[in-house]
Image (cartoon, rainbow, N blue to C red):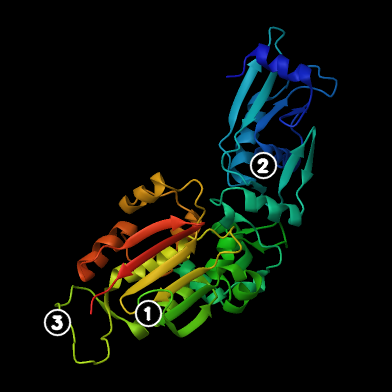
């Protein structure tokens, strides 16, 4: 709790990078911008009831101010901020409200998709170039909430979107009555903007975007899939192509590619003797659900903030390798060991929550990495490899022949 002594010390120092003073709460939109600016800078405090001459005037309605601050932090800021609010009373009867802002989950934006930072006593909207550079420097956990300002409503695949929504409620709009903006922006929280403005987020576009739109507007989401004739990356290339589009399209295309070269089983096959007559090597067999889960995990848990490292899936004679962009710093060595037990620092939680619903992708099993490791080893009798290096996460599961 902020004491009167601490509050007066803050006020006497005047506004700076970490402190903003307000005589009252009269413009919720500007207050939201100020909160976002402090949260994106490194946190700080806003004090209500102090004028520009650093004199404590107090508030006539401190309870209403506190309630409005709670609403702003919950509804006007993405991701929502849990407010820490103190009401400080003076012997004169004057009361002020202090809002302390935590910055551990940045970046934050206003509901209409704008980012602000604080520079000294002033806040300023972050330009798109500055935003791009800034996002490359911070951790990736909320990158999925970044709005794509070049995307529009026409880039959303309405058939996929409404088939997902109808599974949860009796929603049967007639042709021409689709309210895509309302559903994506307010119900699913996958877009920013007010009124006619509509900017799908990274999560919104990758989950429900049209294939051609995702490829052109967000090319870093493309996955390169390859078949190599051998057991490692030095083997001869048989086929290679890039798969773009929304995540459901990518999942189905990647599974079709695997099934072209591998057999997928629900139970462990009988072990066969090695062929020594010079015949062609038989197709490898893999556990069906472990492959599906590995493909889903690869698509869901990518660090989209890393621009220069693409996602790849390599199918070899005896194994399948999944390679994803994932920042090494902060995840190893303890996290790389804990991940085998299903203990993860989850990237893209909003994408994961929708993708793993059967209403979106019915073929995704449950169990995560522990299931993949267990079932792939049961099929092949060989332990899968999991490691992180050079900002890449790699999973290699083995099959049996």
Q: Earlier in the sequence, mark 1 or mark 3?
A: 1
Find disc 2 in the rendering and name its residue. Answer: 40
- The span from disc 2 to disc 1 (Cα, nearest Å) is 43 Å
Element type where label 1 sits in the image: helix
Q: Position of residue 377 (x, y in %)?
A: 24, 65
Which is more toward the observer, 389 or 373? 389
Q: Which mark is residue 86?
A: none
Q: Position of residue 171 (x, y in %)?
A: 49, 68
Q: Going by the image, does 125 lie left or right of 313?
A: right
- The span from disc 2 to disc 3 (Cα, nearest Å) is 62 Å
Which is more toward the observer, 180 or 288? 288
Residue 235 image-quadrant placement: bottom left
Q: Earlier in the sequence, mark 2 or mark 1?
A: 2
Q: Going by the image, does 224 lie left or right of 186?
A: left
Find disc 1 in the rendering and name its residue. Answer: 258
Find disc 3 in the rendering and name its residue. Answer: 273
**The C terminus - image quarter:** bottom left
Q: Going by the image, does 369 lie left or right of 24?
A: left
Q: Going by the image, does 246 lie left or right of 275?
A: right
**The N terminus - image quarter:** top right
Element type where label 2 sits in the image: helix
Q: Position of residue 211 (x, y in %)?
A: 57, 77
């Amino acid at each position: 709790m902020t004491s009167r002594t601490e509050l007066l010390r803050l006020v006497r120092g005047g506004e700076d990078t970490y402190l903003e003073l307000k005589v009252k709460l009269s413009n919720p939109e500007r207050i939201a911008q100020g909160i976002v600016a402090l949260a994106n800078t490194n946190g700080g405090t806003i004090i209500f009831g102090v004028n520009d001459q650093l004199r404590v005037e107090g508030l006539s309605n401190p309870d209403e101010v506190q309630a409005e601050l709670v609403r702003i932090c919950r509804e006007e800021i993405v991701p929502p901020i849990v407010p820490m609010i103190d009401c400080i009373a003076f012997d004169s009867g004057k009361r002020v409200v202090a809002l302390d802002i935590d910055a551990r989950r940045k970046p934050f934006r206003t509901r209409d998709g704008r980012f602000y930072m604080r520079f000294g006593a002033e806040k300023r909207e972050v330009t798109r170039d500055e935003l791009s550079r800034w996002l490359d420097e911070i951790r990736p956990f909320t990158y999925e909430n970044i709005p794509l300002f070049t995307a529009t409503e026409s880039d959303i695949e309405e058939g996929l979107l409404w088939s997902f929504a109808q599974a949860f409620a009796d929603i049967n709009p007639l042709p021409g009555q689709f309210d895509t903006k309302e559903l994506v922006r307010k119900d699913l929280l996958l877009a920013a903007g007010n009124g006619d403005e509509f900017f799908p987020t990274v999560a919104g576009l990758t989950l429900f975007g049209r294939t051609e739109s995702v490829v052109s507007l967000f090319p870093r989401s493309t996955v390169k899939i390859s078949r190599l004739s051998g057991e490692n990356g030095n083997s001869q290339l048989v086929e290679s192509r890039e798969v773009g589009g929304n995540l459901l399209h990518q999942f189905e295309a990647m599974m079709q590619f695997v099934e072209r070269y591998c057999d997928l089983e629900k139970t462990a096959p009988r072990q066969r003797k090695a062929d020594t007559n010079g015949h062609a090597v038989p197709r490898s067999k893999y556990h069906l659900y472990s492959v599906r889960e590995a493909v889903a995990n690869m698509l869901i848990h990518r660090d989209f903030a890393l621009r220069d490292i693409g996602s790849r899936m390599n199918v070899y004679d005896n194994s399948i390798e999944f390679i994803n962009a994932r920042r090494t710093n902060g995840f190893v060595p303890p996290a790389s060991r804990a991940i085998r037990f299903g203990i993860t620092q989850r990237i893209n939680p909003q994408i994961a929550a929708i993708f793993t619903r059967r209403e979106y992708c019915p073929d995704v099993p449950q169990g995560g990495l522990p299931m993949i490791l267990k079932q792939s080893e049961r099929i092949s009798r060989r332990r899968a490899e999991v490691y992180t290096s050079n900002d890449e996460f790699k999973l290699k599961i083995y099959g049996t022949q």
